[in-house]
Image: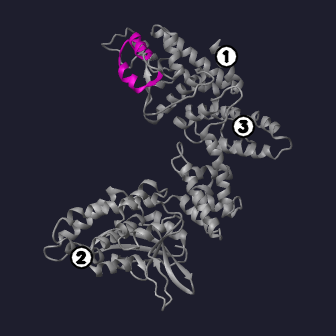
Amino acid sequence: MQNSKLDTGKKYIKDLYSSDCFYNIPEYQRPYVWGEEQINVLLDDLFNAYENGEENNERKEYFIGCMIWNSRKINESKMSYTCHDILDGQQRFITLYLLQGVMRDLSTNKKLQKKVQERLRQEQDEFDAIPARSRIEFSIREDREFLEKFLLEPAGTLLEEELEIIIDESESISEANMASAIFTIQEWFHEHRKSDNFQEFLNNFFRYISTKVLTLYLATPDNLDDAYNLFTVLNSRGLQLQIGDILKAQNLREISDAKVRKRYAEKWLEYENAIESPYRNFDDFLWAIVNITMKYRSDENQSLKGAFDFMYKKELLYKGKKTFDYIETYLKHYRTIMEGNIRSQDNRFLFKNLVTVLNSVFGSQYIPPLMHYLECFGNYKVVDFLIKIDNLFSAHWLSGRRQLQTRIFIILRKMDEILKQKGDKKSLVDTFLQDDVLKYDYDDKNANTMLDIEDFFTLLSDEPWGSFAGTKINKTRYLLLKLDILMGGENTRLHFERTSSSVEHLMPRKIKNSKWKVKQEDHSEWVHSLGNIVLIDRKKNSAFSNKSYPEKKEIYKSVIEARANTNYVFIKYPQWNIEAIKQNQKRIEKVLRQYYEGNSIETFLEIKKSINS
């Protein structure tokens, strides 16, 4: 820890919600998301612990986990108090908060009701100048009104019709889930309410929760970095914070205006919600920002947080609004790519189709250079650029080479270099698109980035593409999808769903005791070749099995299929044998060679023209 004293200890529930304790759900925290299953597990565990010691009146203590918070001094109206920003334990803390509110409203015991009110809220005392204040606040979210109405007001949890409206209509995830949680807790008590001694049970259960249920806490005094480091070391449950959550908090602290700070916090949530596959989460997208900004890999960016700290230190980026705006700039480019609305004059859906293939089976490495291209040059010839990086990156990947990230950094630096040159943007784009860094055989003096494209073409012929399984089958899918693009019509939208499309062998993997008459050596040589495989719908795949080719063709004919390459094969070849496989293999190699060698939209259009002629 950074010259700060870590406060640790244990708190029973009565202490956790005592008169001097106030908590805040900071702006970087996740929403309240506990559902019926998590809530019932907690309540059942509490009840079982309560019930186990009932006979001898020696109920054992029950540990509900560890909480981590960052403690801050708040100065307000000439008074100060300590507020704990909850980093870990938010879901349990809010659930216990809701539980006590429900128990208050189910109880007829005035003392219990008063005790719960004291725990949920500090009452105003005009004589001691103490303001009314909830024990728990939300920094950004509009959830305070929910707490005011349904928790802090007696009988608030019994407003069932209004709670149902919250569940159905609220735009706040936390509000809707807290409303649902109240119903879940009420339902849990339903069975107990049938007994004559329910009120006695309620008193005893409340006493047990208050005095026997405890949490361990670890707190750092107003040091968010230390609190986060502690969190990452200790937490192995629940919805963990991402590095992005901490970056958001650090940058929000740089914005002094409360309204502006709130607006940017809401923007950040929009940023997070905009990220989709192939990125796993928002942190992955932030790594793209790091790569675009730093354009190299070193000790400074071994971790995401370390990379941002370094960029701030070197003034590559500035904290506060400038960081938010910088991220938003690239997020707009990301959305442009994902929406795929960029259309070339000659082909409406080529950009969208290529993005679909890359997102589905390749990954996200193509996105940073494409976003940076849009930032540097706009939409001008962006389809041409996508063709070049798609071909370059896929050839690297399919060939099993590991220098792709190095080439990406070189391309990013080249864009910046060319952008500084004199000339209009169109001429600069033409210069960039003709630069050696986009060629297969570019060899950087500091790294082996050169790719022999002939080695790739040899792989197309020799590799057993149909034998791949696991993640490696994505390579096979990629080639078949690329063939769909090349063989499809100019206005064809490519679709691919991993769960509904599979690689089908036209000559089956096993021919023993089947209708297929082929020599074993020929079968072994050609069964997994590109010439013998197609993409097909899974439902049809199950019907195909080891049927004869005419039977497969008949099954396929009875349905509409958007696979251009598969369509071509079934239309072109009335019979399927080794000679047909060889011819199809030759066609595939020729088309892919022409496309990769030409490496341009002009070549793409030439292929389309030759297919349609």
| Residue matched to label 1 | 609
Q: From the viewer's perspective, is residue 33 above or below residue 503?
A: below
Q: Residue furthest right?
A: 422
Which is nearer the N-term, disc 1 or disc 2? 2
Magenta span has 536?
A: yes
Q: From the viewer's perspective, is residue 61 above or below residue 360?
A: below
- Say which mark, if any, is on residue 203: 2
Q: Residue at x 43, y 58 (%)?
A: 166
Q: Which residues are magenta?
A: 534-557
Which is nearer the N-term, disc 3 or disc 2? 2
Q: Residue at x 58, y 20 (%)?
A: 487
Q: Which residue is nearer to you in this view: 504 or 351?
A: 351
Residue 454 in view, yes or no: yes
Q: Residue at x 60, y 57 (%)?
A: 267
Horizontally, residue 370 falls left or right of residue 21, namely: right
| Residue matched to label 3 | 437
Q: Residue furthest left?
A: 55
1 vs 2, front mark? 2
Residue 392 percent coordinates (x, y): 64, 33
Coloration of the structure image: one colour
Q: From the viewer's perspective, is residue 234 above or below residue 390?
A: below
Residue 571 percent coordinates (x, y): 51, 11
